[in-house]
Amino acid sequence: MGRRRRFFIISIIVVSAVIALIVWLQRPKPVAVELTRVEVGEVQRTVTNTRAGTLRACRRAKLSPSFGGQIANLPVHEGDQVKKGQILFEIWNDDLQAQVELARSEKLATQARAKEACIQADVAKREAKRLTQLRKQKLASEESTDQAIGLAKARRASCDAAKATIQVSESKLAVAIAALERTRLIAPFDGTIAEVNGELGEYVTPSPIGIPTPPAIDLIDASCLYVTAPIDEVDAPEIKAGMTARISLDAFSKEYFKGQVRRVAPYVLDVEKQARTVDVEVDFLSEKDNANMLPGYTADVEVIIDSRQNSLRIPSEALLEGNRVYIYDTDSSSIYEASIEIGLSNWKFTEVKSGLESDQQIVLSIDREGVEDGALVKIDKPNNK
């Protein structure tokens, strides 16, 4: 009997151990999650662009000649720094230069003739005055005196006509110079040559009506830059000139730059297969931010519509649909779902009005498999941001 009893007891212990092992092996495995703490800080409501924006130069001139001709002078190259008033491009213009010189010569000749006519007018005036005095003394005849006075008036009229002719010759010279200047492209401001389309000796023609062609010279002033970005038409009415904004660029992925809205376009863009948008222009608040940037960079803007200090906040990525979060229970190492009331929100932070308390831990990695109400968890990477 003793042996049977011992065998029975041992069997029960073995079976119990096996059952316990099976239960232990079938227990739910903890899900690795990232946690973050509820904190107090600033929360902003922002509006962002719907598509990528572009960094643009405040001044950019795409220059082309007003008529066709052969390139006779091309003193600049792509990348050159140029000054305002510098010649960038010149079409063959020897004939127009000759017309300018002819007009200058005609002006000089007209001035000489006018000087001659005016000297003669002065001589005739003095002669008329002398004869008038002699006439009073009855030493000159009335006829000769009248002739002298008439001649003096005629000479004066000739002088006035010659002076008017000078103005005509000056106008002709201005016309000739203007025609000559049309063959030259002059830098309208200090800048950098971004593009040159043409080579010395090539023939260039202006763009036909309605058919755009590349500019002969593309001049950019990169000392002043701004961002233009499309904003959804639904968000556009809230944006006003002067609002604060944040600028980010793909080329400077870890930096944000302070900006200010300079202009909101007064019309809506309706581009096929795209949402209707309104272009917003944003200036950099500091000129130093422009130092190493190039026009054409991809850029994004966040316009700050509203801001609140010392608000309870959570990372926006921890928020589930329906304004729900998973709260971590330290006693049971599990998580449970809770509804919260939210206020201001942006891509980074969301304001919590009720439902959470400061320093509570919530799940940040809400998209991981197995993360659900009541799940056992283990902390994968504590996050205290």
Image (tube, rainbow, N blue to C red):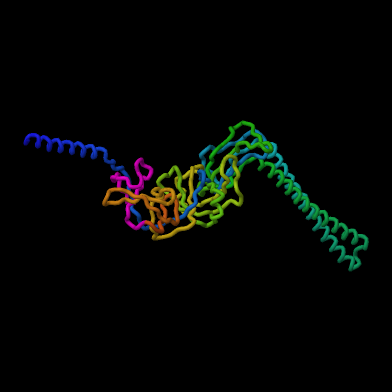
244 up-or-down from 366: above or below: below
Q: Nearer the viewer, residue 180 or 248?
A: 248
Quadrant assignment, res 179: top right
Q: Position of residue 215 (x, y in %)?
A: 60, 38
Give the overall secondary structure of the magenta segment: loop
- The residue depicted at 26 percent of the width and 52 percent of the height is 331
In the image, taking residue 367 as reference, residue 379 lies left or right, namely left
Quadrant of the frame with the N terminus: top left
Point out the stretch of residues depicted in magenta: 356-385
| Residue 362 drawn in magenta | yes
Outermost residue, top side? 202
In the image, taking residue 59 as reference, residue 42 lies left or right, namely left
Q: Position of residue 20 (x, y in %)?
A: 21, 39
- The residue depicted at 29 percent of the width and 41 percent of the height is 28
In the image, taking residue 151 as reference, residue 78 lies left or right, namely left
Q: Position of residue 313 (x, y in %)?
A: 39, 55
